[in-house]
Image (cartoon, helix red, strand yellow):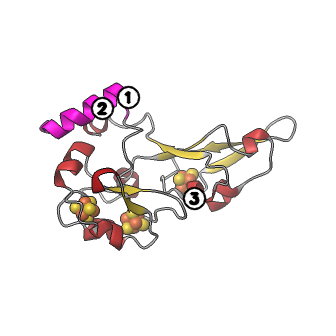
Amino acid sequence: MMRATPNSVDIHRRQLLRGDLRGNRLPMRPPWARPEPEFNRLCTRCDDCIRACEPGILFRGDGGFPEVRFQESGCDFCGDCLTACRTGALEAPVPAPSVAWPWRARIQPSCLSLRGIVCRSCGDACDTDAIHFRLQPGGRAEPEVDTENCNGCGECLAVCPEDAVSLERPQSLSPRDEENR
Ligand code: SF4
Ligand code: SF4
Ligand code: SF4
């Protein structure tokens, strides 16, 4: 059972105030980040993970803590950030990317294809074949994300010309995940 620290209480209160019980609006930490309260306690803001990330998707965020931003590239789950972290703020009890990284892609209404304009950029970028386009009457094609295949790598975010892909935590997280994140 995780011990509640003043920091963790504060984080949960901030989530409640935002109506953000799932933590979707918490900062997106590097893969293998511990649950947010522990991460905040353990991370020394040393920037080692940021320097280690070859695709350059880690940045200094609020308070100097590292955050993921998929501006030009996705995460390839190489583990270099994990190896660089000496404080345990990033930890890999189970190294599978699907466990290390709870986020999954979701297509937003501003998607060009949903609005009848031909675009397949996200589907073309997806290595796991997690985005399929379903043809609708009138020739419109609706993109759908298969959350079983999606590993949340963020490549589709980086290539979308409309910023129409977001990453969210799916409903299938376990109660323990819910408690801790
Ligand atoms: S796993 Fe690799 S690509 Fe992903 S954030 Fe860490 S260092 Fe960067
Ligand atoms: S390497 Fe670890 S301690 Fe340093 S900024 Fe990254 S997560 Fe925090
Ligand atoms: S986040 Fe990665 S795996 Fe998921 S749909 Fe986008 S490109 Fe595919």
Pointer 2 residue: 14
Residue behind label 2 places its C-beta within 8 angstroms of ligand 2: no
Q: Is residue 179 left or right of residue 173?
A: left
Is 44 included in the stretch rendered in magenta? no
Give the magenta-colored segment's residue range: 1-22
Q: Position of residue 92 (x, y in %)?
A: 26, 59
- The alpha-carbon separation of the residues under discs 1 and 3 comes to 27 Å
For label 2, the crowd category at 10 Å Cα-Cα, with few meaning under 14, some 14 to 19 and many 20 or more, is some
Describe the element under mark 1 as helix, strand or loop.
helix
Which amino acid type is shown beneath numbered disc 2? Answer: Arg
Which amino acid type is shown beneath numbered disc 1? Answer: Arg
Pair 1/3: label in front: 1
Pointer 3 residue: 158
In the picture, which quadrant includes the N terminus?
top left
Q: Position of residue 104 (x, y in %)?
A: 49, 46
Q: Is residue 120 visible?
A: yes
Q: Are marks 2 and 1 in contact (CB under 8 Å)?
A: yes
Q: Image quadrant of residue 90? A: bottom left
Describe the element under mark 2 as helix, strand or loop.
helix
Residue behind label 1 places its C-beta within 8 angstroms of ligand 2: no
Pair 3/2: label in front: 2
Q: Residue at x 59, y 55 (%)?
A: 156
- Image quadrant of ligand 2 equals bottom left
In the picture, which quadrant includes the C terminus?
top left
Pointer 1 residue: 18
Q: Is residue 15 left or right of residue 124?
A: left
Describe the element under mark 3 as helix, strand or loop.
helix
Q: Image quadrant of residue 49? A: bottom left
Q: Is residue 79 visible?
A: no
Is 19 included in the stretch rendered in magenta? yes
